[in-house]
Image (spheres, rainbow, N blue to C red):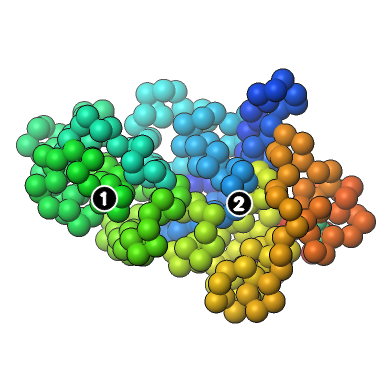
């Protein structure tokens, strides 16, 4: 959905290496990742644990620094901003973490937790901050009495509502949701997903929605990027991607969704994902790929744009 003249966020060629704990070669957690997020859309990022998706989220917010690449947000190159300018820009970019238990300070009241970003950015006087906090609590479905209480008094779903209230209090343009429902019971997940969809409409938000759960990503995303071992292997509008996955990894993931039409011929992935410290040569997916051929073992596939009935999509696979 290209809703604006320029993307709200555009990352190009992002690379992140971490030193290995055992003194071996560096671990390439994110390799040459490029993506765009348009105003008002949700970009889902999906992949198994260790695919680099959470590292990518932190790179995009500059919570950790990329080794290479560029990140443009609302027209500014984030990697060139000094501390003060970055701080100002962060008002527009917020994150909601997976674990609503770990991300809320147990010694602070909910009112103080939600008000903290306003305090940090020195926005408004006390009465204005208080009314803003109460408004955000209301938007996430919590009453004003919640402001006086502490995190341990709330359930997991309510805590995630508090995390969301804190993320929207600065009226951001983009919210990165990092596995926002993975720690919650299935019955609560849909309530939080519906809340996120409602807030997106009401507050004109853009989301990056990160999850290992494809059915959740399918439910909320306009476009989807599939990550494997630090790379985006397929990126496409959600509907054609789920209807007709092109990359063999996407195909295997979708075939495993219970009840999904693609699931009638389930493709079982061989083994676990390899270590990013020692990735296989050629296509990193080749040892597990049901369509691998000789070239896959020696040559890294580059992303190609494939024209499809549902629009153009990017695929990194020698089959295309
Ligand atoms: Fe499979 Fe080869 Fe495509 Fe990699 S490049 S996904 S191994 S067919």
User: Is label 1's Cβ within 8 Å of ligand 1?
Assistant: no
Residue found at x 80% / y 64%? 290
- Element type at mark 2: loop
- Gap in Å between the C-alphas at discs 2 and 1? 27 Å
| 47 left or right, relative to 247 | left
Q: Residues within 10 Å of mark 2 (few under 14, many from 20)?
A: some
Quarter that holds the C terminus: bottom right
Position in image of residue 113 (x %, y %): 23, 36
Give the numbered dot on residue 48: 2
| 124 left or right, relative to 104 | left
Residue found at x 63% / y 75%? 263
Give the numbered dot on residue 155: 1
User: Among all residues in the image, which is located at the extreme left?
Assistant: 127
Position in image of residue 130 (x %, y %): 11, 39
Q: Nearer the viewer, residue 202 or 249?
A: 249
User: Among all residues in the image, which is located at the extreme top?
Assistant: 23
Q: Is residue 56 above or below residue 66?
A: below
User: Is label 2's Cβ within 8 Å of ligand 1?
Assistant: no
Q: Could you tell me if residue 314 is visible in this image?
A: no
Q: Nearer the viewer, residue 216 or 78?
A: 216
Q: Nearer the viewer, residue 153 or 94?
A: 153
Q: Earlier in the sequence, mark 2 or mark 1?
A: 2
Q: Is residue 142 above or below residue 56?
A: below
Ligand 1 falls in quadrant:
bottom right
- Element type at mark 1: loop
Position in image of residue 118 (x %, y %): 22, 34
| 60 left or right, relative to 28 | left
Give the numbered dot on residue 198: none
| 106 left or right, relative to 299 | left
């Amino acid at each position: 959905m290209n809703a604006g003249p320029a993307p709200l966020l555009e990352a190009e060629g992002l690379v992140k290496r971490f030193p290995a704990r055992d003194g071996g070669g560096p671990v390439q957690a994110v390799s040459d990742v490029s993506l765009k997020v348009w105003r008002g859309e949700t970009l889902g990022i999906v992949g198994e644990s260790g695919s680099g998706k959470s590292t990518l989220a932190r790179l995009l917010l500059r919570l950790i620094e990329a080794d290479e690449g560029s990140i443009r947000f609302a027209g500014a190159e984030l990697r060139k901003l000094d501390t003060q300018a970055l701080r100002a820009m962060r008002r527009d970019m917020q994150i909601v973490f997976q674990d609503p238990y770990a991300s809320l300070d147990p010694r602070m009241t909910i009112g103080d937790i939600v008000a903290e970003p306003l305090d940090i950015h020195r926005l408004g006087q006390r009465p204005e901050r208080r009314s803003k906090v109460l408004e955000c609590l209301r938007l996430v479905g919590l009453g004003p009495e919640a402001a006086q209480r502490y995190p341990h008094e709330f359930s997991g779903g309510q805590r995630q509502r508090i995390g969301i209230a804190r993320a929207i209090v600065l009226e951001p343009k983009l919210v990165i949701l990092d596995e926002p429902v993975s720690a919650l019971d299935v019955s609560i997940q849909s309530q939080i997903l519906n809340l996120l969809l409602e807030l997106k409409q009401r507050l004109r938000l853009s989301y990056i929605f990160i999850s290992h759960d494809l059915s959740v990503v399918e439910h909320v995303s306009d476009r989807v990027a599939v990550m494997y071992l630090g790379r985006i292997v397929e990126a496409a509008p959600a509907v054609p991607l789920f209807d007709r996955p092109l990359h063999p990894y996407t195909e295997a993931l979708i075939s495993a969704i219970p009840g999904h039409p693609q699931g009638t011929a389930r493709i079982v992935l061989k083994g676990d994902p390899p270590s990013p410290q020692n990735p296989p040569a050629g296509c990193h997916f080749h040892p597990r790929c049901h369509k691998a051929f000789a070239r896959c073992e020696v040559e890294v596939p580059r992303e190609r744009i494939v024209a499809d009935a549902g629009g153009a999509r990017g695929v990194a696979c020698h089959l295309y």
